[in-house]
Image (cartoon, grey):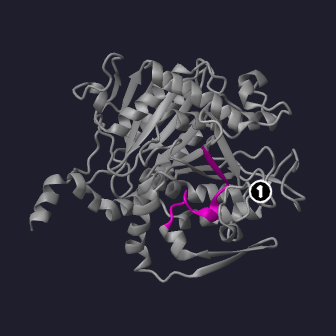
Amino acid sequence: ILLLVLSLLGCTQNVPYRTGDIAPCPTENPDNPDDACNIALIEQHEGYDLAFVEFTERGNVFDRERMAQVLAYAAELAQSESGVAAVVFVHGWKHNANGNDPNVHSFRDLLQQAAALRTADSLPAGRKLLGVYIGWRGLSLDLGFLTNASYWERKQVAHQVGKGGVTEFLLRLERTVVDPERSNKNLLLVTGHSFGGAIVLASLNEVLLERMVSAEPARQGCGAAKPGCSVCLQSRPFGHGVVLLNPAIEANEALQLKENAARMCFAPTQNRLLHVISSDADKATNKSFRMGQWLGVSLRWREAELQRRFGEHTVLLDETDLDTTTVGNYMPFRTGYLRQDDKDPTGWAYQNCVGAALGDEDCIDEPDQRNNHIPAATNEPLAFIQTDGEFIADHNDVFNAKVAGYLMAIIAEQRYKRRLAGDGDIRAEEIPAECVRENGNFNFGGCFDNYWQRFDKLDKES
């Protein structure tokens, strides 16, 4: 009875936090909880704007008129001469859209730093930076350690939110910002963290699968695609990229996407549909998630062993592993391992898992793991990147300079491939020299180094 009373006392309301309208936010104190900025539907800051769309536990948007207001605001920016760069963030467990929420503060800081790099070639000066924060009741109990007891019901709610109105909003935002019928200057990047990553994948899984299945032959041909490809395809990405950061969602939810990608041939102009980045140092998704899923899924469901054949390679996939391992920590999906370079503490070493044959220097440690690795070919539109604690220190360390640099490199790569595909709106000088190799190919590592070091410098100067 005492526990029930405490739970009721610590229960947060299922109501929207953003009840205001459009509000300018003072530069000197944007996070003042008494400021109208903290309840604004759209915050107007120097260098960027931040809009909010909030959803109920059942996945319904609280107010369709207010969602329409956000979309209209984005449309006005998108149709302006300078255009818009829109970045969506979906928060995870124990967070919401409250102006005091740490994720709101961190997203503001990230946008402010990105605005300071407006002269960067992948974010041309003049384009308005618009952040879109998708809020839901990630914090249902505020009882300190006892809040952890909300894991199972918050995970279920996250899936419900993802399969509800978030899909509609993201599709409408994409249509508003990115017109597939014509080239434009606009950018749209969708990100999600923890259960927010689960929401993003749940909301866009079928959208990404449909775009992959309906991919059309690329005009540029196959280039250096995997052997045996006579026709290479190109599918339309969602916006200009979808990124999951330490996502708390089981690998089983992405199996269809991965299987289809492994069976198809993609052209060099293919943009990434999905980036998944998970850290070895994230105890929440590496350990706690496994136990939670085993108790919540494996004890209730009859799980099977799946046999899949990819060319001459046969892979055995255990549904228990698929259910208890997060999508970013599931070894058979892995396409690369990014870690601090042992020889150069200031540099980064990237071990690849892409190619027809995996060797001693790939991203897989154990031979038996190599046998059950789903082949990943050049130009595959899915990236499953494992990293270490120097890149992401723990579960919540997803707003640091390295993550910001990675996101900027994603944008630069997307623009490079648009130019490669013949988009005349993308000029060569708009792509930083650090992002292009001497042979003309895109240099993701060099691009990432360029941007994360610039964000790191901003961190130290602020």
Taking the magenta stretch, the answer to whether it contains residue 214 is: no
Q: Nearer the viewer, residue 68 or 247?
A: 247
Question: Is residue 257 shown to the viewer in this render?
Answer: no
- Which image quadrant is residue 59 in? bottom left
Image quarter where the C terminus lies is top left
Q: Which residue is mark 1?
A: 377
Q: Is residue 435 left or right of residue 231?
A: left
Q: Nearer the viewer, residue 334 or 266?
A: 334
Residue in the picture at 38% in, 30% down:
42
Query: In this picture, is 24 found above or below 104?
Result: above
Residue in the picture at 78% in, 25% down:
428
Query: In this picture, is 400 found above or below 293?
Result: above
Residue in the picture at 55% in, 67% down:
252
Q: Position of residue 364 (x, y in %)?
A: 66, 60
Q: Secondary structure at mark 1?
A: loop
Magenta stretch bounds: 325-339
Q: Position of residue 300 (x, y in %)?
A: 40, 80
